[in-house]
Image (cartoon, rainbow, N blue to C red):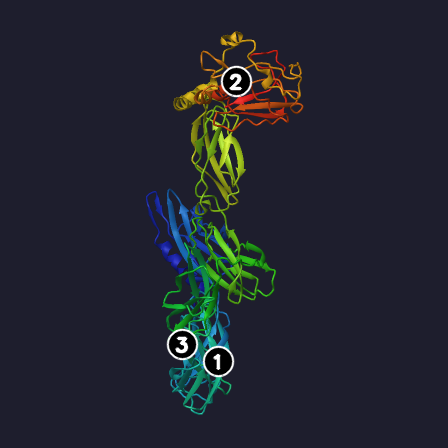
Amino acid sequence: MQKEPVWMLLWMPCILQLASAQISGDKVTLHGCIKPKYEYVQKGSNLTLYCTLNETGYIERLGWNLNTGQYISSKINDSSSKISILDLTADTIVVGCSVYLSTRQRIDEVKIQTGDPPETPQNISCIYFHKHNITCSWIHRRDPNIPTTAYLTLPDNTTQNCSAHTESCSFFSGLDLLGLECNITLHLENKLGTATAQFTVNATRIVKMDPPKDLTLLPTKDPSFSISWKRPILSPDELYVKCGLRYRELQDGQWYYIPELQMGIEKEISYILGGLHAHTEYSVSVRCIGSSGQVWWSEWTEEVTGRTEEQAPLDSVELWRVIGTTEGTRLVNLTWKERSGVRSTGITLGYNVLWLPEVRTSDWRNKTTKNNEMTLNITEEAHIISVVHINSAGRSPAAILRIPATWERAREVISSVHISTTASEETTLTWSVIDPRFRRFVLDWCIYSGDGSCNISFQYVENSSQWTIQKGTLELYKRYKISVYPLLEDRAEAPWITYYYIKEGAPLYGPNPKVEDLKETEVTMRWDLLRADESNGFITAFSIVYKPLDGQESVVTVNSDVYEYTLRSLMPDTKYSVYIVANTSGGKTSGNPIHFHTLPESSKYIGVVVGVLGTFLLLVLVLGIVYKHQKEKIKTLVWPIVPDPSYSSISGWPSDWMQVGQFVDPVLTDGTLHSGDLHILHAVYVNDRRHSRELLLPESWGITETSMAESSVQVHYAAADNCSESTTSTLLLQSAASPRAVSACSSPPPPPPSSSSQSAAAKEEPPDLVVFCNEEIAAVHPYLKNSVRTRVVLCL
């Protein structure tokens, strides 16, 4: 019997659907199919599909539906249409054909997966697990859309199916294959094709042992571990073995390797692992391999952990201080830490702190603490301080620091410091010194808030003039006080101090102004200093922004150290608003605005009047108080008692009232009073306060002692020619108890009176008279205006 062509078999589903076509009245139900029914096609290829209807006459209304890609459709005959899809790149393609009558009728639809045939496997490798099996693996690009199967053809022509989901396969299970060598073929197959590869297996070369057994750690001194392990159970007895060891600190993920430790055919081996850190936990594991050309190491053993023994600290701690002062004493805040890069070698039991005056070493004190800081109260003299770290294994060397006396002057060794921050926010300090002996430095830093408190951190720098502060150590927008101290042995010299921001921003708050001294055309604004923790950067300037409520803004910029400013040229009787802006290199922030109203122009006159009136009232009050307490003195000073010439009795005196002979030396004169001998200009009176005034004449010298004490008498007369030339004589009439008059003139005293008058003179002895010859003074007498020259006699 002749076989039907293959194409007839492809058309059979369509023929069956055509046979089931139904026609009911004017409503037509069409059936058809898409051929061929592909399930997988190769990605990137072209695809041709056909859609056949059950009836003719409707092909013109047939259309194709495609979810992706480019296509070309065409009519084949009255009942068939063709579509060609070009360059299939999508993983899944859905193709359908429909007829559009009164409604859309879906005829058929197909879903096609795209993919690739298997590629030739690469990197084939096999491992012989001794007395277990041979496992081979390979690499090929797995297509997720098309299932791929793999199988091996062994030397005895048997087939070994492999896993459908992994690129590996195992065979010869449970056989001892040492010395065996065989050729094997690997087959890969999917719906689009097949790939094969051949390889050779040498069981002795690819043998892989189990991991070693019974791995143990025993801590020893120095510190180190004694490590031991046993040979793998299923390793061939005749095979020489070498092992590798790896170890790491538990807190560190990095492994350290010792690659080859020859074990030979021994059943057990030990190894001393040294060079470790004291009192540190370590993890160790071991693996082994044949030393006869084998290529596969065993798996690592499970990790075994242990801790090394303790050890006395090898290095001293890093010690630093902050010195404060109180009355008569000083507070020294000590802080210390382990040296950078030095690990703990044991369990810390504490720190012993010892301090003593530098000149009185016997006066020492010490104290033990478990903290890393301590505050000491010491005197103003120099002190030596040491700190010793103590653990269960011993004591560390002492860290020594000298605290200078308060009167000592530190040397300035650091000449300059440069500080910068990179884009990655790492801050680098570089400094220069004038003395090359200084190769050790301490850097301390803290967030500076401006109130004096500073929680410092510090770092020692050895043999370098540069240090980098890693990112994250310093906070953004915080002002840091950074100090660099040079150290020589245990002495710290004068630091270089700077303030720094690694990044500046706008201030948190703006200044709030206050109005003071408000006037007609000016006003004084004051504002407070921004704290360091509010400024977020160094203030570069303040901007004062002001304006009338209905006017334009004006701006005045002042320096960062100005906190008071007077706005001038304002309009009187006007309401203004003002606010102040604080500026940094990272931004600016405005304070809260305030309002003020300038005074009217007339207000200044009121102020002047009020000021003058107040001053006048105060002066009157003061003068009243003074006058009340010093009334008599003020009356004497302002209104002195002056004799009135209109009441003078000189006109009633006798014409011979003056005894000329008493004033003229008889030796130097001829007895006649000449005009050049004596010029009497005027006379004054004894006791001006009496109504009957007595002439100051020899006859009237009999006045009582009491009356003489109550009066002052001035006698003005012309000088006698026998006194020194151009002199003025002053006669002081003293009381009767005074010594006799002494003449300053060179002329002898006048002759004594006659005996007839001696008794009267004894009763009325004139007061003592003292004559002083001084410089001649020309004066106009206030009462006798025609006098030219006067002599003054002051009678007390």
Question: What residue does disc 1 label?
Answer: 258
* Viewer can see residue 76: no
Q: Residues within 10 Å of mark 1 (few under 14, many from 20)?
A: few
Task: Give the camera-side residue of 395 and 224.
Answer: 395
The answer to whether any part of residue 435 appears in the image is yes
Position of residue 218 relative to residue 644, above or below, is below
Q: Residue at x 57, y 56 (%)?
A: 417
**Of the two numbered discs 2 and 1 in the rendering, the one whose residue sits closer to the viewer:** 2
Q: What residue does disc 3 label?
A: 394
Image x and y of residue 411, in percent: 56, 59
Amino acid on which the number 3 mark rests in the picture: Gly
Are there few (<14), some (14-19), or many (20+) residues within 10 Å of tag 3? some
Which kind of residue does numbered mark 2 sit on?
A: Ser
Mark 2, other Cα within 10 Å: few <14 / some 14–19 / many ≥20: few
Mark sitting on residue 477: none
What amino acid type is highlighted by mark number 1?
Answer: Ile
Quick one: SS at disc 1? Answer: strand
Gap in angstroms between the C-alphas marked 2 and 1: 155 Å
Query: Could you tell which of marks 2 and 1 lies nearer the N-terminus?
Result: 1
Which quadrant would the N terminus be assigned to in this image?
bottom left
Q: Secondary structure at mark 2?
A: helix
Residue 337: x %, y % from top left: 43, 66
Whole-percent x, y for residue 370 in the image: 36, 67
Sequence order check: which comes first, mark 3 or mark 1?
1
Mark 2 to mark 3: distance in Å?
Answer: 130 Å
Q: Quadrant of residue 594?
A: top left
Residue corresponding to mark 2: 757
Front residue of this view, candidates 423 and 757: 757
Give left or right: position of 252 versus 673. Answer: left
Sequence-wise, which precedes: disc 2 or disc 3? 3
